[in-house]
């Protein structure tokens, strides 16, 4: 038996004024099907969005979630499953080219770009691409991640490499102190 599309079902089942509010979200995935609970819920992004909209929007979306949950066995809810964890993001860094105007909004020069790329090449966990856009050199770094923590860690690593390249170009070492060796008589 072919299951019905959730939005087609909502168009048929909700009052017209409520469906008009929900139809604006079609294609944006406001709903998630949670197989572990058997319920259809709003995505976190849409819960946040609805807090700034009039109350009739919230009522329409809650009614839609309840209808979809009640008739789950008739509907193709696979389209409403949350995306699998992980994914990929692209970080874009722009650098001034030689001869770019001093008032340019870009804060790093071409030497930083070269050092940044060298550090990225040495770190095999990141792939990158260099582009030229007018008087800008753009480095796009692709980060693949498994979860939010992995994304945070890898993004911080790339930002650290950029800061390291900037400091190397400016001749500013990282500040720190060395841990001194204990005197010979105190060693185990």
Image (cartoon, rainbow, N blue to C red):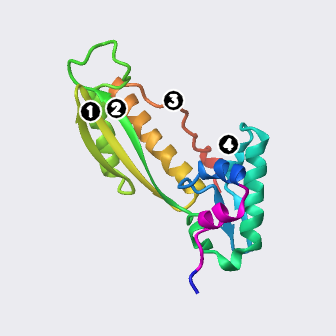
Who comes first in sequence, dot 3 or dot 4?
A: 4
The label on residue 175 is: 3
User: Viewer-nearest of labels 1 and 3?
Assistant: 1
Residue 128 pos. (x, y %): 32, 49
For image coordinates 67% across by 78% down, the residue present is 74
Q: Is residue 179 above or below residue 146?
A: above
Q: CA distance from mark 1 to mark 3?
A: 29 Å
The nearer-to-camera label among 2 and 4 is 4
Q: What secondary structure is found at the residue carrying circle 1? A: strand
The foreground one among 175 and 181 is: 175
Q: Is residue 13 magenta?
A: yes
Which residue lies under the disc numbered 4?
49
Image quadrant where residue 3 sits? bottom right
Callout 3 secondary element: loop
Q: Is 14 situated above or below 130?
A: below
Instruction: Label 2, secondary structure: give it.
Output: strand
- Relative to 148, is 182 above or below? above
Query: Going by the image, does 45 lie left or right of 67?
Result: left
**Badge 3: how crowded within 10 Å, few (<14), some, or many (20+)?**
few
Cα–Cα span, label 1 and label 2? 6 Å
For label 4, the SS is helix
Crowd tier of the residue under label 4, counting other residues whose Cα lies within 10 Å: few below 14, some 14–19, many 20 or above? few
Tell me if label 1 and label 4 are in contact, CB under 8 Å.
no
Q: Is residue 45 visible?
A: no
Q: Are marks 1 and 2 in contact (CB under 8 Å)?
A: yes
Near-viewer residue (84 or 78)? 78
Q: Which mark is residue 137?
A: 1
């Amino acid at each position: 038996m072919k299951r019905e599309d959730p939005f087609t079902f909502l168009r048929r089942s909700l009052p017209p004024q409520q469906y008009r509010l929900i139809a604006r979200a079609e294609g944006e995935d406001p709903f998630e099907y949670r197989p572990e609970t058997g319920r259809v819920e709003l995505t976190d992004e849409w819960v946040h969005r609805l807090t700034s909209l009039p109350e009739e929007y919230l009522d329409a979306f809650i009614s839609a979630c309840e209808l979809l949950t009640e008739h789950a066995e008739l509907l193709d809810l696979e389209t409403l499953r949350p995306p699998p964890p992980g994914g990929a993001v692209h970080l874009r860094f722009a650098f001034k080219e030689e001869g770019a105007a001093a008032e340019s909004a870009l804060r790093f020069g071409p030497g930083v770009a070269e050092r940044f790329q060298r550090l990225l090449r040495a770190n095999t966990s990141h792939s990158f691409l260099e582009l030229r856009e007018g008087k800008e050199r753009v480095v796009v770094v692709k980060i693949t991640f498994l979860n939010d923590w992995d994304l945070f860690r890898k993004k911080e690593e790339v930002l650290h490499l950029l800061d390291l390249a900037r400091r190397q170009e400016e001749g500013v070492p990282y500040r720190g102190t060395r841990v001194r060796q204990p005197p010979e008589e105190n060693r185990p």
